[in-house]
Amino acid sequence: MLDKYFHLEELGTNVRREVVAGMVPAYATAGALMYVAVLMLGQLTHLHWDDITEAVPAVVVLVIMPFTFSIANGIAFGFISFVAVKLLAGRAAEVSPVVWALAALFALKFAFGI
């Protein structure tokens, strides 16, 4: 009954899965976020900080993740900002077609909820 009311089958889920997911408090994901943050911070030493088109997207990722409580959102905004910064700097040719496609898909997701 609830499946039909909330259109859960169309969303690829069911009542049991939603109840179990709802029982996980937000602070339970903090450990995973902290672990990913430590792994990412370790990689910052390899970043070319003198190249603004490389540094800005990295900072965007690091800032967005904790504010949205989502690793995926941080990475998505990183792709979008990477393409945007390279485009604004006149270095769009340095961006691979796959990164362009991912950035476009992420932008559509955030703009239209696709």
Image (cartoon, rainbow, N blue to C red):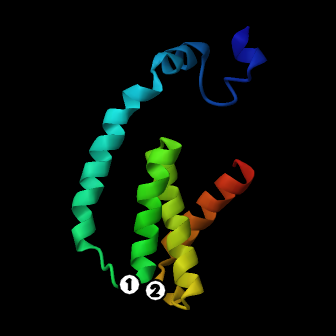
77, 93: nearer the viewer: 77
Residue 43 left/right relative to 30: left
The label number, if any, that marks residue 94 in the structure image: 2
Residue placed most toward the observer, 113 or 61: 61
Residue at 45% x, 80% y is 53
Residue sitting at 32 percent across and 79 percent down?
A: 49
Earlier-in-chain disc, 2 versus 1: 1
Instruction: Give above or below for 111 relative to 30.
Output: below
Instruction: Characterize the local packing of mark 2: few (<14), some (14-19) or many (20 or more) Cα atoms within 10 angstroms.
Output: few
Give SS at disc 2: helix
Image mark for residue 51: 1
Residue under the point 38% across and 84% down: 51
Is 88 placed above or below 74 here? below
* Quadrant containing the N terminus in the rendered view: top right
Which kind of residue does numbered mark 2 sit on?
Glu
Label 2 and label 1: CA atoms lie apart by 13 Å
Q: Position of residue 19 (x, y in %)?
A: 55, 14
Q: Position of residue 106 (x, y in %)?
A: 59, 58
Which residue is the extreme one toward the bottom?
90
Residue count near mark 1 (Cα–Cα under 10 Å), binned few <14, some 14–19, many ≥20: few
Q: Which mark is residue 80?
A: none
| Horizontal side, residue 104 vs residue 76: left or right | right
Q: Position of residue 45 (x, y in %)?
A: 22, 69
Secondary structure under the numbered disc 1 in the rendered image: loop
Residues at marks 2 and 1 touching, judged by CB atoms closer than 8 Å: no
Q: Is residue 76 above or below residue 94?
A: above
